[in-house]
Structure formats: C-alpha cells, structure tokens
Amino acid sequence: DAVRKIVQRSHAGTEEEAVWVTSQVRHAVQAEKNSLDDLIRVLDRNYGKAAEVSPASQWAQNSTHVFLAVKFAQRWNAPGALEVGNQTVSITSCCFNFTAFGEHSMIRRRYHLSWDLFQPLVVEASSWSWAAAGRMTVIFAKAKPAHWPRLMSGPTATPKNLGIWHDMQDKWTSDLEKFAPLTSTAGAKKGKAAGKSAAAMPDTKKATAKSRKAKAVEKEREEKEEEEEEECDGEEE
C-alpha cells in the first residue's frame, strides 16, 4: 500500500520524479521475480547440479581453414541457452576443448566438447568468438592446405548432432575442388578409414549437385528433433 501511494503521488509530480519512481519500482519487482524463480528452482533436488550437454554444431571448410558454429542446445533447431559463462576454450595443434555453463528451461547445464581433429592446426592463427542467439564461432587454421574428408581424427567419432554448415560450405566449393579429399590421417590405415570417412564430408562436386536436397533433408530432420526437444523440455519442467 505504501508503494502504491508513492507511485500515485509521482503522477502528480514532475516528469523526472515519475521516471525515477518508475525505474525503482520496476527494479524492485524484477528482483522479487528473480527471488521467486530461485525458490522454484530450489524445489528441484538436483538444483545446482549441471546437466551435461554436448552442444549441436555445424562445420565447413576451405583449403586453409575449418569453420565451426556451435549452438548451446542439444539439437541445432531446438531452443537452448542464450548466454553462457565460466567458459574454458582450448585450441591446441591436435585438439579442441570447450566448456561453459548456461541455463535453459530453469535447468543449469554444462556444455562440453572435447575433440581430436583430423589433422594438425596452427594454434596462433586459430580463434573463437561469441555469436548472436546463444552461439559461438570457431575458426581453425590448418597446418597444411588440404581437403579434409571429416572433422574428427577417428572415422567413428563424429557426434550425431554435428552437421554440415551448408551455407558456409557452398562459398568454398571452387576452392576445395583444387584438392582431392585426404584418405587417411598420420599413422592411420588407408582404405577402410577412407571408406568410412566419406559419409562425414561428401565429395565437393557431389555436394554441389546435391546441396539443395541435403538442406531439405536436414531441415526436415531438425524440425523433427525440435519437436522431440520441446517434449523433453516439457517433461523436465
């Protein structure tokens, strides 16, 4: 009641007084909402324990670099955390490691990636940055110009939620056509590894011919995954 009286009096005052009172009231209301939200979270016995999530990613490449887009969600076309913090990012000559904490659907989540990459990198020329809408972008500089047949060192190590960044890949079609896809990593056996790797990154010419069809199929898959993710979020809530 006292706050209501103060607000009503501000209506009869100057414009500056009314703006100041409005700001204070909105701030107090928001603080109270945050406090109540925290109270709801405490009801969950697992509150404070972060759920492990391997974030969805898409990749593309040219002859000298690999481009990686990471979304803080389990599926690329599903909702996720808009912001993360306490991040740890490590790019070495062989590997990429990323960890950050965020919150989605009132659940604290730990987003983590730990990858051994197909071939060595130039660490000093590699970089990462935040992107809009709960995403990050990573650029890996290849130690040698090449056409990688896959992103990971092992042919069976590709995560299910790692896809091709088609829009970016289409920009570098002519560049990759100058290089035949590599068939093995250092120390890896040829033949079997090369055969398995073909599914990870399609041949450039074939990818160009089937680009539209691949995008349509992937969009349909992502829409289905989004529906499944929404159902899971509903159960969690």
Image: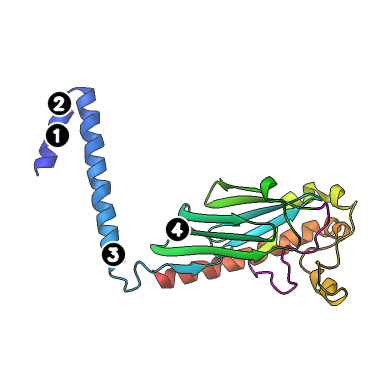
Q: Position of residue 36 (x, y in %)?
A: 25, 58
Return the residue at label 2: 12
Could you give the CA–CA distance between mark 1 and mark 3, rounded to whole angstroms?
32 Å
Q: Which residues are magenta?
A: 144-161
Which amino acid type is marked by label 1? Gln
Could you give the CA–CA distance between mark 2 and mark 4, rounded to whole angstroms?
44 Å
Residue at 83% over, 51% down:
145
For marks 1 and 3, give the one nearer the viewer: 3
Which amino acid type is marked by label 3? Ile
Could you give the CA–CA distance between mark 3 and mark 4, rounded to whole angstroms?
18 Å
Question: Quick check: marks 2 and 1 in contact, CB under 8 Å?
Answer: yes
For marks 1 and 4, give the one nearer the viewer: 4
Return the residue at label 3: 40
For label 4, the SS is: strand
For label 1, the SS is: helix
Q: Position of residue 11 (x, y in %)?
A: 17, 29
Dot 2 or dot 4, earlier in sequence: 2
Return the residue at label 4: 102
Q: Position of residue 157 (x, y in %)?
A: 69, 72
- Does residue 149 belong to the magenta stretch? yes
Dot 1 or dot 3, earlier in sequence: 1
Above or below: residue 18 compared with residue 237: above
Residue 8 disc label: 1
